[in-house]
Structure formats: structure tokens, C-alpha cells
Image: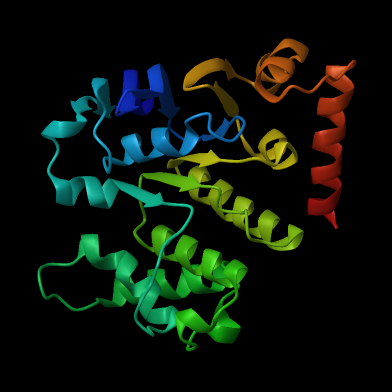
Amino acid sequence: MSLLRGTALSLSIGDQPILEAVDIELKKGEILGLIGPNGAGKSSLLRCLAGSVRTDSGVLQLGQQRFVDIPRNERARRIAYLPQQTEVHWPLSVTRIIELGRIPHLEPWGKLSERDQQVIESVIADADLLPFRHRPFNTLSGGERARVLLARALAAEPEILLADEPVAALDPAHQLDVMEMLAEHCSRGNAAIVVLHDLRLAAHFCQRLQLLHQGCTLAVGKLGEVLTPDNLENAYQIHLPDTQSAIDTLLNITWSRIKK
């Protein structure tokens, strides 16, 4: 079942093409890994899917409805977008930041319900934020901030999570924690599109990969269909003489770490 679908999405800034006729589909229950070199258009595509940037052409659908026909408040409940960088200019506590994730579910000026509080407490624990839940957000390290912002996104209980490099500032253990949180979220019938540069994480956690190169889709499908010698050479200018061995290595390295 398709939760989100973009057809022939194109975007330019001035006379510079950023995306060119990109098709993308997110299926229920999956993590779709969006991979590719820097400047390939991954972040721009994610912003288009979140509705924060309007494409020049193409059609975006949420379920069976056109994206533009869905009220903003409904879209906010169904889609959470986690950008690479989010600025918080007020000295709000970690708990307060995460509480903001429940806003799409509240009536205007409404208070948090018992159910809201339960969700907040759950994501705080899952994101390993209990030790500093009362600290001001702007006193945290970059990795700690990243986990807080992911917890805020998950607190919205979105059907779809769009996450742009959510593990970039994290140590290896917390990278795995974050990907496991996303996997658990998707196991409940939700789905996520995650921009990743770490192919080990992509290999283990993503059911499908979509490889972008110069604003176009170079390949989409399962791991072995995407990480072929030709695709790796064209996108990354790297050469692997034995692709299957490389894929097995990626999977085994990640899996051995998770099992410990």
C-alpha cells in the first residue's frame, strides 16, 4: 500500500535544475533509504515531500488524495519532517521541546491530555533522554540535540516520517538506537524516508533504497539492485570489484554490533 507518492517531481532554483522528473513511492511499513552523493538533490526532495517547498511540476499524493487538497492540520498529523538543522532560539527544556510534537493533535489553546503525556514519556525513554530531560535544549551537544528533535518528531505519532540525515551527529551506538527507533515506528504500519550517507545502516535497516545522482533517480529497489558496480561508479566514483562481498560485509558489520 502506497502512503506517499511523487510522480515526475521537478524543481529548479533560478535556472539551476535541482530535481528532474523524480518518481518516488513510500510503502506502508517500510524505511526507504534515500542515498546519493552530496548535492544529488536528496534534501530538496525531502522538503518537497514535506510540503515546505513547492515543486515546479509533478504530482504529489498522500494516500489516494492529492497533497494540495489535504488541509494543513491533517498533513501535520500525518507527516513529520526532521530537517538536517533546526534552530531553537529559546532556552526551552528537553521535555518542553518534545511536548511541541503533540501540537498537531491539540485543539487551539488546548492542554496536553493524559494520552499526550504518555506518548511524550515513551519517546523520552526510547530516545535515551531521561538523564537530561529538564536541561535547556541549547546546553546540549549536537548529538543530544539530534535525539531530542527526533523524539519531538516521533511524539507527533506521524504516519510518515521524513528524516534528513538523522544520525549524522551521533556516535555509533546512538546511530543504531535511532535507526532502531525508526524501525520500531515503521513496524506499527507507519513508514519513513531517511536520508543516509552510511551505507552500513542503509544496508541493514532499509527495505528499499533510492539512489539520486545530479537530481535524477539513478536506481531504486532492494539493496543488491541499487548498489551495483555501475551505480556505485556513476554516483560515487568508487569501484568495488566484488559487490556482493561488499554488501555482505556491510550487513555483517552492522548486525554484529546490534547483537552485542
The number of discs equals 0
Up the image or down, 89 lies above or below 199; here it is: below
Where in the figure is residue 169, as x and y percent of width and height? Answer: 63, 60
110 and 246: which is toward the camera: 246
Q: Which residue is situated farthest in the top direction here? A: 230
Horizontally, residue 88 falls left or right of residue 107, namely: right
Task: Identify the residue shown where x is 61% and y is 35%.
Answer: 206
Task: Identify the residue shown where x is 77% and y is 14%.
Answer: 229
Query: Where, quadrant-wise, is the C terminus in this rendering?
Result: bottom right
Where in the figure is residue 251, as x and y percent of width and height? Answer: 80, 35
Task: Identify the residue shown where x is 22% and y is 62%.
Answer: 105
Up the image or down, 201 lies above or below 154; here it is: above
Query: Where, quadrant-wise, is the N terminus in this rendering?
Result: top left
Q: Which residue is situated farthest in the front direction here? A: 15
Horizontally, residue 69 falls left or right of residue 105, namely: left
Task: Identify the residue shown where x is 42% and y is 46%.
Answer: 161
172 and 233: which is toward the camera: 233
Horizontally, residue 84 falls left or right of residue 155, namely: right
**Rendered image quadrant of residue 146:** bottom right
Where in the figure is residue 189, as x and y percent of width and height? Answer: 44, 41
Horizontally, residue 145 falls left or right of residue 57, namely: right
Where in the figure is residue 246, as x and y percent of width and height? Answer: 86, 26
